[in-house]
Image: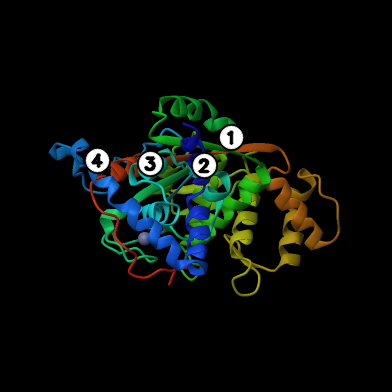
């Protein structure tokens, strides 16, 4: 039991385990592989354990998690792949674990917060568009790759009850949940970044798209998709004090809400050409500042500075919700990993065709 605990500690991070031992291999190539040879014959014993045709499941067969009960703008999804050939090869050949133990460790694996937040993936993780793609590090075939889906929920009031219900309903063996403390400001900027990356600023329809995303985020209870399906234009209302109304395909927004939309549009497009594009045309920062001051938005937000750049910083802080705390919940779908390890139990781990810790 003691040995088991020790090896669990070793493989807490698949990333680190693989990197560390890849380095070790470069330094001490011969002794490591000699050790591996003697260990390699043992795992064949477990063959009798796997019987029945259900063991040969196709990769990627698990149904995606249904998060449609949560506001769509508060949920992100990212698919990653982990190469089990890379992981098992390193664990058995270089760390000297028996294959069965290595498989158990992989089944137990759940990523750390740092790992789920990492933008740049390294061995044994990679992203893949093509299901048949071979491992970018070791060249193994697709059957050795498990999909890891990472969902992130931004936990606002609008999401809290459903988020709790959802987390309660997840079977613990198939999913790992990781919490992250953040601020509303962080969440807002990350949302704006995500929206920006998905739009084409050369195509003017993006203004409408960004407006739709923002309104869904701001007011998730309204069925905005149905509203947007019938609207031709978005305008500033002269009548409304708050909220919105739809009139013959024209969406009228209360002045402050409309100004928020201009700000978001400016924020998303300001790096594109000079100034940012909004529903009211292109604004430079001083023009936007004058516009928001005249409309009363700056006063409503409690911003008194005369400097456009300071005002912009403060106004974005105001719009984002400032330093108020907020939590992100990451749900890591491990089901495909568990299935893959099981399906591959009998197979000999392929030797790396290429060995690289960096993506080619
Ligand atoms: Zn690999």
Q: Between residue 262 and residue 25, name the one nearer to us.
A: 25
Residue indicated by mark 2: 74
Alpha-carbon span between mark 4 and mark 1? 48 Å
Residue located at (45% from left, 67% from top)? 29
Residue 50 sits above or below residue 119 on the image:
above
**Disc 2 and disc 1 in contact, CB within 8 angstroms:** yes
Q: Which of marks 4 and 2 is in front?
A: 4
- What's the coloring here? rainbow
Q: Which of marks 3 and 1 is in front?
A: 3
Mark sitting on residue 46: 4
Mark sitting on residue 101: 3
Q: Where is residue 219 in the image (x, y as percent from the top left)?
A: 54, 38
Residue located at (34% from left, 65% from top)? 352
Mark sitting on residue 156: 1
Figure quadrant of residue 266 = bottom right
Instruction: Inspect this view and state whether residue 242 appears.
Output: no
How many residues crowd around disc 2 within 10 Å: few (fewer than 14), some, or many (20 or more)?
many
For numbered disc 3, what is the local secondary structure?
helix
Q: Does the residue labelled 4 lie within 8 Å of ligand 1?
A: no
Alpha-carbon span between mark 4 and mark 3? 11 Å
For numbered disc 2, what is the local secondary structure?
helix
Alpha-carbon span between mark 4 and mark 2? 45 Å
Alpha-carbon span between mark 2 and mark 3? 39 Å
Q: Between residue 67 and residue 232, name the one nearer to us.
A: 67
For numbered disc 4, what is the local secondary structure?
helix
């Amino acid at each position: 039991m003691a040995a088991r605990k020790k090896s669990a500690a070793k493989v807490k991070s698949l990333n680190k385990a693989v990197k560390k031992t890849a380095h070790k291999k470069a330094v001490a190539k011969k002794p490591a592989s000699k050790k591996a040879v003697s260990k390699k014959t043992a795992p064949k014993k477990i063959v009798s354990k796997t019987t029945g045709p259900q063991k040969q499941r196709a990769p990627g067969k698990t149904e995606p998690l249904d998060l449609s009960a949560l506001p769509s703008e508060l949920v992100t999804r990212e698919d990653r792949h982990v190469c089990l050939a890379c992981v098992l090869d390193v664990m058995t050949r270089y760390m000297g674990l028996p294959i069965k133990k290595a498989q158990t460790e992989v089944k137990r694996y759940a990523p750390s917060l740092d790992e789920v937040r990492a933008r740049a993936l390294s061995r044994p993780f990679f992203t893949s568009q093509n299901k048949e793609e071979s491992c970018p590090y070791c060249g193994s075939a697709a059957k050795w790759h498990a999909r890891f889906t990472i969902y992130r929920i931004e936990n606002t009031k609008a999401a809290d009850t459903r988020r709790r219900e959802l987390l309660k309903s997840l079977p613990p063996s198939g999913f790992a949940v990781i919490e992250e403390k953040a601020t509303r400001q962080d969440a807002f900027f990350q949302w704006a970044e995500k929206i920006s990356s998905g739009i084409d600023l050369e195509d003017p329809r993006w203004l409408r798209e960004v407006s739709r995303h923002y309104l869904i985020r701001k007011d998730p209870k309204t069925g905005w998709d149905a509203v947007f399906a019938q609207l031709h234009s978005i305008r500033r209302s002269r009548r409304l004090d708050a909220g919105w109304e739809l009139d013959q395909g024209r969406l009228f927004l209360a002045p402050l809400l409309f100004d928020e939309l201009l700000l978001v549009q400016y924020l998303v497009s300001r790096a594109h050409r000079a100034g940012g594009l909004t529903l009211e045309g292109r604004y430079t920062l001083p023009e936007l500042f004058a516009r928001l001051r005249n409309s009363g938005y700056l006063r409503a937000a409690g911003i008194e500075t005369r400097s456009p750049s300071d005002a912009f910083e403060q106004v974005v802080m105001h719009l984002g919700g400032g330093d108020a705390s907020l939590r992100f919940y990451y749900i890591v779908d491990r089901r495909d990993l568990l299935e893959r390890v099981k399906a591959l139990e009998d197979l000999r781990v392929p030797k790396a065709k290429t060995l690289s810790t960096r993506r080619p």
